[in-house]
Amino acid sequence: MAGEEDNLSTQLEEETGSRLKNGCMFTFVVWCTAIAFLYLTKPLGKALDVDFGWLEFICWILLTLICPAFGVLFATDLKSFLDWQAKRTGSTIWFRFLILLGYWLLAAVVGCMGVFLVLAAIHPDDEHSHWLNQFLFACISLPFFIGAWLLLIHPFRKYEGETKAEQQAAWERWNQRMKKPDFLGIEAAGEMHLPFEFKMMYRPDSEWQTKEWILYPLGLDNDSKLHMILSLEPADTESLWRNWNKTTNSEDLFLCFASHANGYYYLKLEKGNDDPAVYEVSTDDGYSLIAQLSPDVTPEKIADHFSQFINWPKEPI
């Protein structure tokens, strides 16, 4: 299930990137068309004896404002997509050039606005000759220069997320861990034996591996309280955690074994307890393990024993 979700996520990323590329290309074509039309306006006007003044105005607006603005809107997400792909091909070099062009054109427009305000402060007309007006013009120009600088350097900012290759490598490793659970390592760390039903969950043909479930602690007819399991987590020593010191003993050992939309399920491993309690942790950050394991997070015990948890009525999602 996790591998299928990863493939779907990658496919959606690729489709989004394709749309962003089309948007950038369309904006670039419109921008080039505006330049070409402005270049041909005078000879065409003379040849056809037509005044293209209003069309020239529209082209100048497209050239200096609309195309750079839309270009940056597309370029912002496209840059992240290209950084995520982490490929160096003729296509990616071309689109990175378009990203650079869009940002720098808008930076030029914003910078020119700042220069205009500075000139208005240095050479005011009679109506704005008071020193306070000059000072205000100078102050107002500062954000324009800062904005222009930020636009100039944005195409060169380092990507801080995971690349496509890194995500695929992580998922492949995750899948390998799922295929090779380390029950002995967990039992040695917790000085206990894992329930037989728990180990059966990790069989390749297990219903927990092939479906997503909703558990009804109070029965199928009562949905006032329910728990969702979207995926199992690898059963090995990497899934063991010692945390939540504010609400549990710092020596408590927890095994993360399943996840839902906003968090994870854990077994509390205790020496000699072969039917451990089940805890749930939910946060607004969802799958963020950093948030899940924060000392500020309070784990909620949802079942005194795993045997209760596993036998709750359930139905597939």
Image: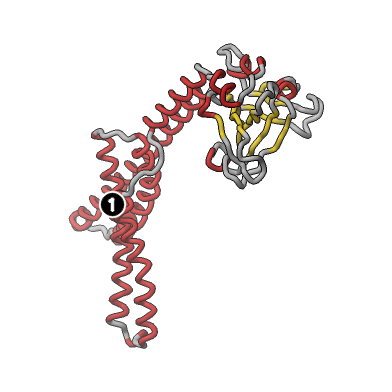
- For residue 55, say whether it is visible: no
Count all numbered tags in the image, as a single digit: 1
| Residue marked by disc 1 | 34
Please state if 177 lies on the left or on the right of 226 as rendered: left
Please say if 81 is above or below 122.
above
Q: Quadrant of the C terminus?
A: top right
Please say if 221 is above or below 246.
above
Rendering quarter of residue 60: bottom left
Between residues 192 and 229, which one lies in front from this camera angle?
Answer: 192
Residue 230: x and y, percent? 61, 27
Residue at 30% across / 33% down in the picture? 87
- For residue 80, say whether it is visible: yes
Residue at 31% across / 58% down in the picture? 107
Rendering quarter of residue 66: bottom left
Seen from this angle, which residue lies furthest top?
Answer: 205
Please say if 252 is above or below 313.
below
Residue type highlighted by circle 1:
Ala
